[in-house]
Structure formats: C-alpha cells, structure tokens
Image (spheres, rainbow, N blue to C red):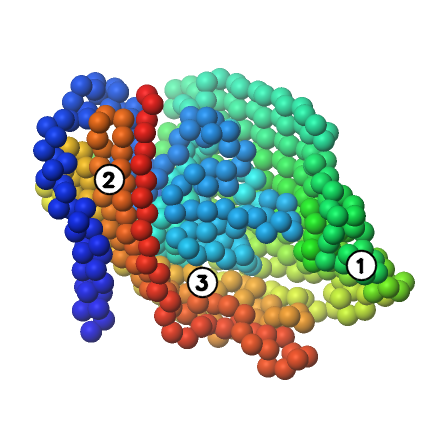
Amino acid sequence: MQAISRCMKMGRVILALSLILTAMPLLAAEKYDPMSDLSLGELLNLEKFMVTATKHLMPARKAPAIAAVITADEIRNMGAKDINDILRNIPGIGISRPGTLPFDARLEVRGIKTPFSEKVLFLVDGHRTNNAYTGSWLYPLGNLMVENIKRVEIIRGPGSALYGANAFIAVVNVITKSAEDIDGQQVSVGISSFNTQHYTALFSHTSDDFQMSGHLDYFDTDGAASLIEEDALTGKFGSLAPSNTLEFVEKLDFGFKVKYQNFSFNGRGIINEYGPYIGTGRALNDETVLKFNQWLANLSYAKNLTNKLDIKVNFYTDLYDQDTYIEIFPEGFTGKNDKGLIGNPILKNRTLGSEVTTNYVLGNHLLTTGIGYEEVKEYDIGGVNNLANPFAEPTPMTEKFVKAVTRKVGALYLQDMWTITQNDSLTLGIRHDDYGDFGGTTNPRIGYVHEFKNNSTLKFLYGSAFRAPTFNELYIRNNPVVVGNAALKPEKINTYEASLEYPFLRHYTLRLSYFHNDIEDIIRVGTKPAIDKPAPWINVDGKTQVDGAEAELLFKFS
C-alpha cells in the first residue's frame, strides 16, 4: 500500500506539470537553437557545473536535483558580505533575522524554518559542518569569508541518500578556491566607520606535482551601536533603555590547501567573538560575550586503479568550541540589589571520521559506493550561572547542563548513474545510517532527467531524508524550561519533485518546479507536565504535508 501511495503522489506531481508539458511542442517549434552560434569556449563559460548532486562534476541543469550554482563572479557582483547574502538570492530560500543576536539568521526553505536551521546540511568543500549539539552551522560558519569562495552549490530537496543526517530540505556546499583559481598573491585592506577594519589575503604556489593555496580574513568592528528606545524591561527596574546596542564583532578565518600527487590536505579555522546586539532576553545588557570557534581538517588519497575504477580514502576531523557568557537581564532587573541574570554554557564537540568511496564504470552505468564511520564526542561541558539565585555572583555549575556523550555512526551507500540514451538518464541511490544512540535509518532516491533538443531539461525526482535528534534535544538537563528526551526518533521526510528548465531567445531561461513533502516525527518542545516542571522534547504524532511551486525567469546580459 505504501508503494501504491507513493506512485499516486508521483502521479500528482506529473499532473501538476501537464499544462506546461503540453506547451513543449510549441516551444520546440521555434526552430531557434539558443546555443547554435556559440563556440565551444563560450558554451563552457555559460554552463555551470556542480558536484553536490551526485558527488561527480556535471552540468547543474542535468543534475538529478533542483539545483542552483552561484559563482565567484556573481558573488562579487552582488556585493555579498556573508553566506546569507548569497543564499537570499536563491528562489525558494528566505533569510530572516530575529534581531536578538548578531549574525543570527534563520533559513526558510520551501516554507520550513527553525531556530537553528538544522534541517539544512552545510558543507565546506564537501566537509560536514553542522554541530551535534544544536544541529546548526550558523555559528561560526554564517560569517564565512566570501573572497575565497569559488562557487556555492545549493540543492533544494532531500540529500540523505548521499550525505546522511541534516540533508533534510536542502544541501549547501561551499567550494573554496584552490591554487589554480588564485593568481599569485592578493591582499586587500578596508577601513571604515565604527572603528571597522578588514584585512584579507589569498596566496598560491604551484610547482610540478605540488600545489598550495591559502587564505586569511580578519575583521574587527565596534558596530553601529544603534539606539534602542525600549526593550523587554522598559518601565521596569534594571532597564538600560534607552541605550545603544552592543554590535562588536571580531573574526579570524584562515586556512590552507595542499595537494601533492594523489594526496591532498585541507585545513581551516574560524574564530568569532560577538557582542549581544540586544540580547537573548530582548533586554539591553553590557556583559554578554559570545565566542564560537570551529576547526576543520581533511586528509585524502585518490587514485585511478584502472581506466574504469578509482578509489578515494578520506580522513577528517571537526572541532566545535562554544563559550557564551550571556547576561540575560542586567543588574537590578528585580528592583533590588541583584547581580543580573547570568548563564554561561561552555562545551565542545569533536568529530573524527573516515570514508572510502569507489567509482566504477560498467557500460552505461557509473556505480558509486561508499562506506563511512565517525565518532562524535561532546565534552568539556561547564560554565557558570546564577539562574537559581540572581542575588548571588555566578558560580561554576555543580551539574552539567547537558550530558557528556559519544555518538558512533556507521554509513553505507550505493548510487547508480545510468545513461539510458543520449538525452535520458536515471539516477538511483540508497544509503543506510546506523546510530549508536537511536538506531538505523535507510533513505533512497530516484532521479530521471530528460534533455530536449533545444537544451530544455525535464526532471522527475523522489527522495527521502532524515534529521537526527541533537544532543540538546536528547540530553539537555538542569533547565527550568525544557528537558531532553533520550527516546526521540529522527525526523523523516519524503519529497516528490518535478522541474522544467527552458532556455529561449538566447539570454532567457525559464525554470518551473513543483514539490510535495510528507514529514513525520517532527521534533518540538512538548507540554509541561506541571507548572514547576520543564517541558520535554517530543516527536509530534501524525504527518505534515507541504505542497509548493517555484518559478524563476533568468536574463543574462552577457
């Protein structure tokens, strides 16, 4: 019955595009080939390529996914200052800012938005960056250096069949520049108002089989210090309003890439320190300091064993370090001689992992297999607070606010890219992830792509994905508002998509897509069992359905 239901839903997707498809003969009858008078070089410059959809470099319009690619030239021309400026230009993606913390952005993808954007998988050169504590990547990756970006690849839709957890409603992959993309050394210096200074540097070196490149980005500002007339405590004791926000930011982003013959290494460090802007309690304060650091490293070996078989072995590590000293309310907020309300959660997440991938050409099939294992450890949990008694100075926490745990994950996946004809391709994939704390989950995908003679493409897609419960949702404790639930199940989604891309009159491209989502086991905060008891995280019973359409008209000036 489940298979019949899925077929019926795919039928609805096909029906939704039936009116568009009936117009295809008329469109094709124009007799005008938009690429007919272009040279091969011009065609290559117009074509955008991506690896995220299949882990193989291919034209984005032929990829089995609703995909978009933003190039370095486009990033520069749009004046983007961070990754959120780039993503807001993608149809189906919105950016909102709650306004309580600096750089606190929330991604809305196809109508779905959560506080930590944990349903979006964020990759840097294919390296997972979502932390295990909240599932988020926004701190500190939202402030990533843009001058070192070669392109950003975005998939709207599920990606768990290749990438596992968090690839729920979208996958964002930031591809950074290598030695061949950097012309020697590049340095820039910027100084502006609010004591702002910004220094960037890119360098590269190439000789024989050796390539090396690197980047450095340092940014420091006092911020605009905007005047706030009223805050959450206005008219009450302890209010600092009217006063100015604290918007200071200090960021250091540095890293390097090295490639020698079949070996390559990619390392990066991002260090951020922010002011509170207004603050988590929507009350102005003068003591909050937010520190978020992340360190990424990959060591890979890739070799062609035969002309039809290649192998890649990858070892990686990730360290996420959070130290947030938060003054929720300032001194005197009770109207008496209190010390303010202070919370200072400190923790670290460390990931160690490895993955082996093979690619084998068998006739018209490109078979990709992968096996991986990783261990995620949450440790060094501590900090100070006075949440129980705001009249006392903050003291070290006597009990950890979240359990110190180690998560072990094994994964196995298989993908078949089948070139049926010159104009038709079928991609089949499946991945199984096994988690030591909540069990296993299996996620398949199907993607059919047809290319018409006038370079139009038609896609029919199906995929499932999951979002693993975070350590915060499973193990948080000693919190008066919410408590963890070790029995949580992963969130699940089944997505059905159809898309048509049609280039016409040389400079125009029309893109239309339809999607249907079935979501189960959504994780949210439940109901308090009693007034003095915290509410548990729960899985919501039943299904949530989302239907939507996206339309995009592109014009290329040159």
Q: Is residue 428 above or below residue 8?
A: above
Name which of mark 3 and mark 2 comes first in the sequence.
3
Q: Where is residue 17 in the image (x, y as percent from the top left)?
A: 20, 51
Residue, x 14% and y 36% (percent of image)? 27
Determine which residue is flagged by label 1.
Answer: 235
**Which of the numbered marks, if any, corresponds to residue 468?**
3
Q: Which circle marks residue 253 in the picture?
A: none
- Residue 434 lies left or right of residue 232; in this view the side is left
In the figure, is residue 300 to the left or right of 349?
A: left
Dividing the picture into quarters, in which one does residue 390 lie? bottom right
Residue named by callout 2: 501
- Quadrant of residue 46 within the rendered picture: top left
Q: Image check: 60 left or right of 527?
A: left
Q: Which of 394 and 247 is in front in this view?
A: 247
Query: Which residue is located at x 69 percent, y 34 percent?
Result: 221
Q: Which of 12 and 488 is in front in this view?
A: 12
For the residue labelled by badge 2, is the local secondary structure a helix, a strand or a loop?
strand
Residue drawn at x 40%, y 41% as measured from the top left: 90
Q: Indicate which disc, 1 or 2, sits on the residue closer to the N terminus.
A: 1
Q: Which residue is drawn at 34% across and 23% down?
A: 557
Horizontally, residue 387 falls left or right of residue 415, namely: right
Q: What residue type is labelled 1?
A: Gly
Which image quarter is the N terminus in?
bottom left
Front disc: 3 or 2: 2
- First in sequence: mark 3 or mark 1? 1
Estimate the x, y position of residue 224 in percent, counting from the top left.
70, 36
**Three-letter code for the amino acid on which mark 3 is drawn:** Ala
